[in-house]
Amino acid sequence: MYDYSTLDPGKLEYISVAGIDEIENGERLFVDIDDIPLVIFNIAGDFFAIQDECTHDHESLGDGELQGFRVTCPRHGAEFDVRNGKACTLPAVIDVPAYPTRIIAGKIEVGLPLDT
Ligand code: FES
């Protein structure tokens, strides 16, 4: 539903957020783009960006524990797949927006839909 990582690249605007050496493996980075709070995870050298707001009751997801590709909301324990934003467990039933990333000249870029 909100998995922008599959959107046509022509409908995205890529914005540079950090150098690849600024997020170590297993770590995360918080950024705001156009008032959208995002958290970007480095999992084994691949970068995944989701909105940093749980769809259950607005908690920051980036503060949650990461296991594999799942992050656990620290408030009530819902799990989300950081690759596509899918809500995997209750109490969340709505997916969180997921955004594509790419690496250009050593910088991590996040793609945002042009109409947001
Ligand atoms: S606020 Fe995230 S599970 Fe409730």
Image (cartoon, rainbow, N blue to C red):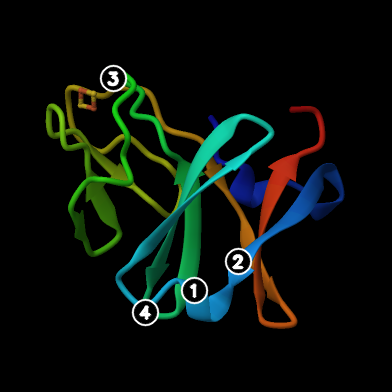
N-term-proximal mark, 1 vs 4: 1
Dot 3 or dot 2, earlier in sequence: 2
- Residue to which mark 3 is pinned: 56
Residue at disc 1, CB closer than 8 Å to ligand 1: no
SS for callout 3: loop
Secondary element at tag 4: loop
Q: Quadrant of ligand 1?
A: top left
Q: Residues under labels 4 and 2: Cα distance? A: 17 Å
Task: Please name which of the two marks, 3 or 1, marks the residue nearer to the observer.
Answer: 1
What kind of residue is marked 3? His
- Judged from this view, the residue extending furthest toward the left is 76
Residue position marked by numbered label 4 in the rendering: 44
Q: In the structure shown, which secondary structural element does the residue marked by tag 1 occupy?
A: helix
The type of residue carrying mark 2 is Ala
Q: Which residue is mark 2?
A: 18
Classify 53 as above or below 103.
above
- Where residue 63 sits, quadrant-wise, is top left
Q: CA distance from mark 3 to mark 4?
A: 28 Å
The answer as to whether callout 3 falls within 8 Å of ligand 1 is yes
- Label 1 to label 4, Cα distance in Å? 14 Å
Answer above or below: position of 106 versus 66.
Answer: below
